[in-house]
Image (tube, rainbow, N blue to C red):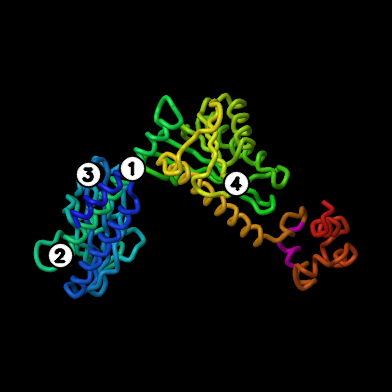
Amino acid sequence: MEELSDQMEMASTQLDFEKAAAIRDKIISLRRVQERQYVSSEQGDLDVLAAKVCDGMAVVEVCFIRGGRSLGNKSYFPKGSADSSPEELLSAFIPQYYLGKDIPVEILVSHSPEDIALLQDVLKQESQHRVSLRCPQRGNSVRWMKMAITNAEISLNQRLSSRSNLLQRFELLQEALNLDEMPKRLECFDISHTSGQLTVASCVVFGLEGAIKSDYRKFNIEGITPGDDYAAMNQALTRRFTRLKKGEGKRPDLLLIDGGKGQLTEAKAVMAELQLDIDILGIAKGPERRPGEETLFLVGQEGEVDLAPESPALHLLQQVRDEAHRFAITGHRQRRAKARKTSPLEGIDGMGPKRRQKLLQQFGGLQEVKRAGVEDLVRVDGISEGLAQKIYDVFHGDK
């Protein structure tokens, strides 16, 4: 597994990602074979926690053993732990991880935290049963721990390899765009709607560590002509960067706009109005909308930016663009689902919950309310002629 890990890292360095993925699958298969060998080696329920810190990154690998069988494992990469020792890492991780979770009777740890007795007491109080927290010294428990440590090393190597490849992509992007400095923070905006309705703009953020999902933002677009993507882009950018002018949020090194020259023009206008000097790159899909056929425009540079389909810099831009597209669609679908659950009656002034309930009961449902005329609506107690007219107008377009 160590040899395969080295081969995988070499393939990733050479940008041969297909080969790296195939090697990764072999590593996973070997790891699962190991798990099967130990299936009957332990009895009972326990978790196995292995901590590893290397090259500015930390990982805690959690393996789940239930009824003597491995139910799999999961890798956690706590932020701000690069300077911690494995003991400190586990001391901080354990109480946070087990808060609100089912806690097994036994937890094996790769390193013994200084406050291990206190941690045991906390877990006992949380679970309402005795919890043994210990480093295995002999027997089958040591096998489980070796497996967890191996998994932690593999996970950390993969993350470090991925980070190295991402850094190379950012460096190549700087070179391709002829930027003075390497961009370390990309923000990408995209628009999603259905026939112009319930428009949502997305903003996704990528840094040298990959996607920074805590900085993602969605904007519900209002007050524009349905289907006007240019106006939607203008509104989203204005809202985002007005906040930046007020000192809210972080400044991107490169602004990526999913769209053609029209969307790019809106981005330029917003930056000019807010007096912000940020590099702007537009990425428009080709005629067949196939990856590798994108057209790139960098504001301030004549003509198109030419990147080969196999360029790692282009792959980075595609990855960020696709994530913005996914996030925009997700936001639009959520907004659409919420709109479906909202009754049109809720937006009418004077229609409180009691009147809505009485109206629906009187007519036997919303469909019958839609069919009713003003004269029919007025007959319901509490519905004046003016309110009846408002209800009628909501369903018949005369707003």
Quarter where residue 387 is shown: bottom right
The mark that comes first in sequence, 1 or 3, is 3
Q: Nearer the viewer, mark 1 or mark 3?
A: 1
Characterize the magenta stretch by its predominant secondary structure: helix
Marks 2 and 4, how far apart at CA? 56 Å
- What is the span of residues highlighted in magenta in the rendered image? 351-357
For label 3, the SS is strand
For label 4, the SS is loop
Marks 1 and 3, how far apart at CA? 17 Å
Would you name the residue on which mark 4 appears? 287
Residue lying at the far right of the rendered structure: 375
The mark that comes first in sequence, 2 or 3, is 3
Mark 3 residue type: Cys
Marks 2 and 3, how far apart at CA? 23 Å
The mark that comes first in sequence, 4 or 3, is 3
Q: Position of residue 84 (x, y in %)?
A: 23, 43
Would you name the residue on which mark 1 appears? 165
Question: What's the mark number on residue 143?
Answer: 2
Given contact means CB atoms under 8 Å apart, are the residues at marks 2 and 3 in contact?
no
Would you name the residue on which mark 3 appears? 54
* Residue 243 located within the stretch drawn in magenta: no
Mark 1 residue type: Asn
Q: Look at the picture and state if 387 lies above or below 216.
A: below
Q: Nearer the viewer, mark 2 or mark 4?
A: 4
